[in-house]
Image (spheres, helix red, strand yellow):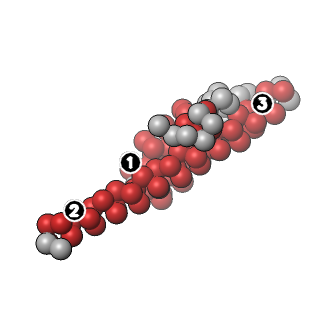
């Protein structure tokens, strides 16, 4: 195998690893949205607010501490995704197990 072909093969393997990780991240985000939706419902049913900003600040800080400054941006997007996202599902779940 030539060095170029070997490099291309390794790149393909690494891309497959990234694709697998992305699928896991998507699944985890869908699970997080579902849990968040349940918490929001319990809180509003009890007469509380849908969102607790002090809790969101803790989450932002956790992501920033773990991932650096871009972590706060990621956390903001995760929070946005999970606010009222009770119907969020991974593609495989929406298509009967077949991701497109």
Q: Earlier in the sequence, mark 3 or mark 1?
A: 3
| Residue 88, above or below 31 | above
Quadrant that contains the N terminus:
bottom left
For disc 1, the marked residue is 70
For disc 3, the marked residue is 41
- Residue 6 at x, y = what percent? 21, 70
For the residue labelled by badge 2, is the local secondary structure a helix, a strand or a loop? helix
One can see residue 88 in this view = yes
- Residue 39 at x, y = what percent? 75, 37
Compared across the picture, whether 2 is left or right of 53 comes to left
Asked whether disc 2 touches disc 1, contact meaning CB atoms under 8 Å apart, the reply is no
Q: Residues within 10 Å of mark 3 (few under 14, many from 20)?
A: some
| Residue 82, above or below 62 | above
Where residue 47 sits, quadrant-wise, is top right
Q: Earlier in the sequence, mark 2 or mark 1?
A: 2
Where residue 49 sits, quadrant-wise, is top right
- Name the disc covering residue 90, or none: none
Q: Nearer the viewer, residue 68 or 85?
A: 85
């Amino acid at each position: 195998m030539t060095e170029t072909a070997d490099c291309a093969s390794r790149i393909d393997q690494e891309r497959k690893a990234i694709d697998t990780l992305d699928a896991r991240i998507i699944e985890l985000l869908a699970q997080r949205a579902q849990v968040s939706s349940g918490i929001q419902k319990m809180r509003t049913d009890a007469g509380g607010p849908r969102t607790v900003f002090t809790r969101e600040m803790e989450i932002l800080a956790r992501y920033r501490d773990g991932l650096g400054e871009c972590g706060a941006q990621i956390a903001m997007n995760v929070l946005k995704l999970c606010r009222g996202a009770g119907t969020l599902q991974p593609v495989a779940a929406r298509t009967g197990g077949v991701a497109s």
